[in-house]
Image (tube, helix red, strand yellow):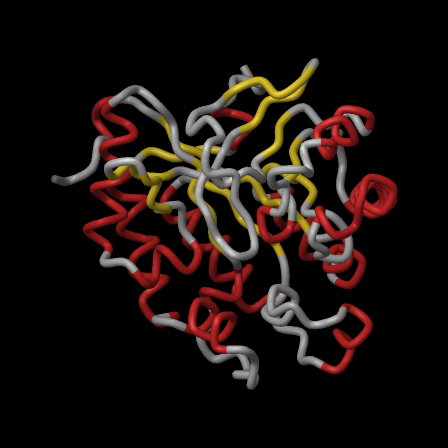
Amino acid sequence: MTGVKAEGVVNALTVDLEDWYQGLEIDPEDWGRYEDRLAIGTLRLLDLLAEAGVRATFFVLGYAAERAPDLVREIQARGHELGTHGYGHRFVYRLGPEGFRADLKRSLEVLAKVGSGPIRGHRAPYFSITSGAEWAFEVLQECSITFDSSVFPVKNYRYGIPDSPRWIHDVGDGLVEFPLPTYRLGKRNIPIAGGAYFRIFPYTFTRFGLSEINSTGHAAAFYIHPWELDPGHPRLSVARRIRIPHYWNLKATEGRLRRLMREFRFASMGEVLGLDA
């Protein structure tokens, strides 16, 4: 199987713009202790996207945008879409409604100063809109977000709504959910979306899973982090459940991503949803 590029289904290529230490469950108050390497992987990624002629959606962490405003402007100058990834990379279900509202608004204020144009999209850190935290959709609507890509229809210790719809669907007045993609195996959804799954599973499984989704006429939302294109970033002694998915097979990311963009069609999430027509 060589992908479904010729069939016309366009997938969303998305980037969670955060530095290497910001997804390791380290308290944000300690972030200042670590080396800033955000530009290294981001610039490599921007060059790969330019090489492939792909426009992506960058879900930008507010904290990162404050410290690298010129990098965020460069992303937008190259034609990519900006969305919000919140401000402090906190679990939504731990923040609660008021905490989430404050975090989201802070991120939007930062992005309004750094970039241009409205912010329409959101992705929760750790995909942490989970069962019992659906109140987050109402907060997103209050803040004029029109599409969200936070729900992973799998069961994971950090995230997931296993019985959530696997395809793009409405979750409220004016708000669309673009869930992370899965392959249905029996009664279980297997994640094939990107990130650690892209590096841990064989490339052939990712290609097969995306081809199966596209063959049904549905689009998938692939995701990646800039630090996955920076295999030389520091290695910390963290819990095994965090260490393995973070550091596993980082050297394979660039080659696999280049191949994926050759074999499948990609665009920004706004384009896939028809918002830029």
Residue 166 x, y percent position in the rendering: 42, 29
Of 104 and 114, which appears nearest the observer?
Answer: 104
Is 249 drawn above or below residue 162 in the view shown?
below
Horizontally, is 141 left or right of 130 in the view? right
Residue 46 x, y percent position in the rendering: 50, 53
Residue 229 x, y percent position in the rendering: 45, 65
Of 147 and 255, which appears nearest the observer?
Answer: 147
Residue drawn at point x = 44 percent, y = 47 percent: 50
The quadrant of the rendering that contains the C terminus is top right
Of 271 and 125, which appears nearest the observer?
Answer: 125
Horizontally, is 122 left or right of 109 in the view? left
Quarter where residue 148 is shown = top right
Residue drawn at point x = 23 percent, y = 34 percent: 211
The quadrant of the rendering that contains the N terminus is top left
Horizontally, is 243 left or right of 39 in the view? left
Quarter where residue 183 is shown = top left
Residue 135 x, y percent position in the rendering: 74, 31
Is 229 drawn above or below residue 58 in the view shown?
below
